[in-house]
Amino acid sequence: MAGAKKTPLSYQERAYRSIQDSGLIASEVKMAETDLHILADGPVTEQALLAVAKVRAEIEGYIRQHPLFLSSLVPLPLDTAAPPPVREMLAAGLAAGVGPMAAVAGVIAEAVGRALLKQGLTEVIVENGGDIFVARRQPSVAAIYAGESRLSGKFGIQLRPEQMPCGVCCSSGTIGHSLSFGVADAAAVVAPSAALADAAATCLGNAVKSRDKKSVSQAIEAVRSIAGIIGVIVIAGEHLGAWGDIELARL
């Protein structure tokens, strides 16, 4: 699947996949372009593969009937007849002012995570290309990888149990294969919906037009009106900005 999320031509080393002291079992699940790193309180590979296959089939089936869904960089109307993940992507795109495929990584991560929770697991983290669905019963920190910025890996987002399950999604104009029209090293959003967090992160990243304090502030202001997001953080060069009900943790 491509569009607002470019398809990687080859596997890229996921330098941000460093999990410390989680106490959970790690699994890798790959299917076509989908490449998941999963942490859970039990083995999940078979169940996760089934969940990935289901959500991908629903999205790909919709794309075959509605090709514009794949390529549009602007919001598309809601479609009540669409499968649930497609409806979530359309709603997220409308809320954030971006194309629906900007939410594809987040919606897949959450679909897989919730499917695993329904199987009886109690703690699940699903990471999909830097976009994360987190469901834990204890405080957790999501570290922020920002490429070559000196702030990369120095800060994380403290997630409280009452904020989870939630999505923590990141867009970047300098690293990774996601399409961004901005220059942020990291533009991260926390929201109850991973699809919304993903779409809003794209909007946030697009709004960072230069690596200075003013542009970071303007980008944050541009997404504050998006209903439903919990908070955001932006790293652009040596500048860091944050807004919302989030707490930064020094790593």
Image (cartoon, rainbow, N blue to C red):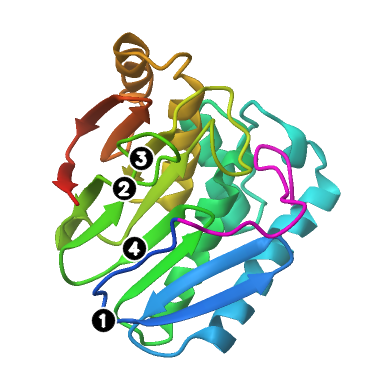
Mark 3 element type: strand
Tag in front: 4 or 2 = 2
The CA span between labels 4 and 1 is: 14 Å
Number of the label disc, if any, that sits on residue 189: 3
| Residue 68 or residue 197, whichever sits in front | 197
Q: Which amino acid type corresponds to the residue marked 2 in the rendered image?
A: Gly
Please provide percent x and percent y for residue 59.
70, 56
- The tag earlier along the polypeptide, 3 or 4, is 4
Please provide percent x and percent y for residue 191.
33, 46
> Would you name the residue on which mark 2 appears?
153
Please provide percent x and percent y for residue 89.
57, 45
Q: Residues within 10 Å of mark 1 (few under 14, many from 20)?
A: few
Instruction: Name the image quarter holding residue 210.
Output: top left
Is 10 contained in the magenta span? yes
Is 227 contained in the magenta span? no
- The tag earlier along the polypeptide, 4 or 2, is 4
Mark 1 element type: loop
Do the residues under discs 4 and 1 have CB atoms within 8 angstroms? no
> Would you name the residue on which mark 4 appears?
134
**Count of residue discs:** 4
- The tag earlier along the polypeptide, 3 or 1, is 1
Please provide percent x and percent y for residue 190.
32, 45
- The tag earlier along the polypeptide, 2 or 3, is 2
Do the residues under discs 2 and 3 have CB atoms within 8 angstroms? no
